[in-house]
Image (tube, grey):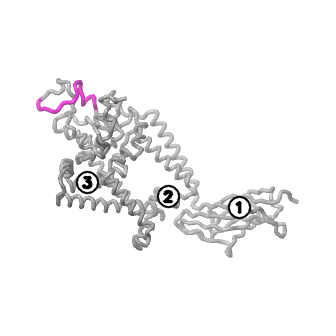
Amino acid sequence: MEAPDNESFRDSIATINEDGKRAWIFPKKPSGKFYDYRKIVSYVLLAFLFAAPFIKINGNQFLLFNVLERRFNIFGFPFWPQDFHLFVISMIIGVVFITLFTVAFGRIFCGWICPQTIFLEMVFRRIEYWIDGDRGAQMKLKRSKWTPQKTRKRLLKHTIFVIISFLIANVFLAYLIGSDKLLNYVTEGPFKHLSTLFPLLIFTGLFYFVFSWFREQVCIIACPYGRLQGVLLDNKSIIVAYDHKRGEGENGRKKFRKNEDRAALGHGDCIDCMQCVNVCPTGIDIRNGTQLECVNCTACIDECDTIMDKVGLTKGLIRYASEDNIEKKEPFKLTTRLKAYIVVLVILTGVLFAMLQLRNDVEARVLRLPGQLYEHKENNIISNVFTYKLVNKTTQQIENVSFKLQDYQGTIKLVSADHSFVVPEQGLAEGTLFIELNENDLKGDKTKLTIQVYSGQKLIETTTVNFLGPRSYN
């Protein structure tokens, strides 16, 4: 069924023309109060993004997402494979927080915090404005023939784009493999680490492709968050909205004319200048209402306020507002839905903090050697063989590690010459051990034992095992 005329804009997106080919968007260079705020936020986040892999807390990288080794650091707090449940809860908390934020304030994350938007709008587009000029100059340059001037501009721009993409790829790699390892690879020379160099070049090409060509289509086509927004938003969500009641009036929009009484003619305050469309980085018309392409970047707010100032009308024709605020003048308030999200977020955060308090810096795991039962030895001794694995999650080496039994007068023998060992920093130690108990101390064919792990005289961890023995005893 064909969509009605006022909804026909939803049948296509601005980045694709009628032939199904890429339609290039030339947004006007934004300016204004919100853009200045966005620049401050963006440059702070950019500084954080580039610095985070190289900041360390207690020897731990501030942010690390080593998927291959399943090691993650969140704000300097290390998560090992054994802590995967904690990492999952942390990610769920992040999703719930973004969901809560979206329900309350729309897609503001995309316009103000998302790295894709920050790099595109505050780095690559600003370079483009510097080299190619503003919207009109860029459109003219694209239509012009290839001249030495156009060639120089294209070479300069894309060379800078490649260099920045290479830097981003290096920082991205620091998040994945660790900054220390990356710096070591750089000092030793990239050709000694070809297995890392090739992924680095691939990431460089990917970032260059995204920021030089694919651009806003990431937000429109690739990112699922825009579709999620349509499910999460309601009439009470604060979004970048056009006040259609004020803008349209009774008889719709009208071009501005001096000394004309627009109110008497029944026309709204929108003078149909199209500047809100020209400045939009995704090419939409905000006057059509909420659209999945809108990233709440506020460029249209700044541009509309500038035009309203010039023609002597009140600012705020486009502003942060909810549909209910525009239709019914209702102020923002916490709805039952928002309160429910807040309760879930508080509960999950409380659970995470409680589990973090119970988490040990050293984790011990003692398991029965597969296929082995028990062995009768002299003097009524029963022996079981186990394997052990100790994970050290700290940045300090743990020395003089030994095992002791709790509540039993048995012995633990390591299959090594020493009675103690060392667990390296952020590493593990593993081996085999024998536990020997007097048969008279056993409580059945399975006896639960508690093994204490000591570093010198300090108890650092406990774990339990099942000790096997004969079914009947004297």
Prevailing secondary structure of the magenta residues: loop
Mark 3 element type: helix
Q: Which residues are magenta?
A: 243-259
Question: At label 3, which amino acid type do we have?
Answer: Arg
Marks 1 and 2, how far apart at CA: 29 Å
Using the rendered image of the protein, determine whether residue 217 is visible from the camera's viewpoint.
yes
Q: Is residue 354 left or right of residue 472?
A: left
Q: Is residue 436 left or right of residue 19?
A: right
Q: Are marks 2 and 3 in contact (CB under 8 Å)?
A: no
Marks 2 and 3, how far apart at CA: 33 Å
**Residue at the spot x=26%, y=49% of the render?**
36
Which class describes the residues within 10 Å of circle 3: few (<14), some (14-19), or many (20+)? Answer: some
Query: Which of 452 and 433 lies nearest the eye of the viewer?
Result: 433
Q: In the rendered image, which residue does mark 1 sit on? A: 368
Q: In the rendered image, which residue does mark 3 sit on? A: 126
Mark positioned earlier in the residue sequence (3 or 1): 3
Q: In the rendered image, which residue does mark 2 sit on? A: 67
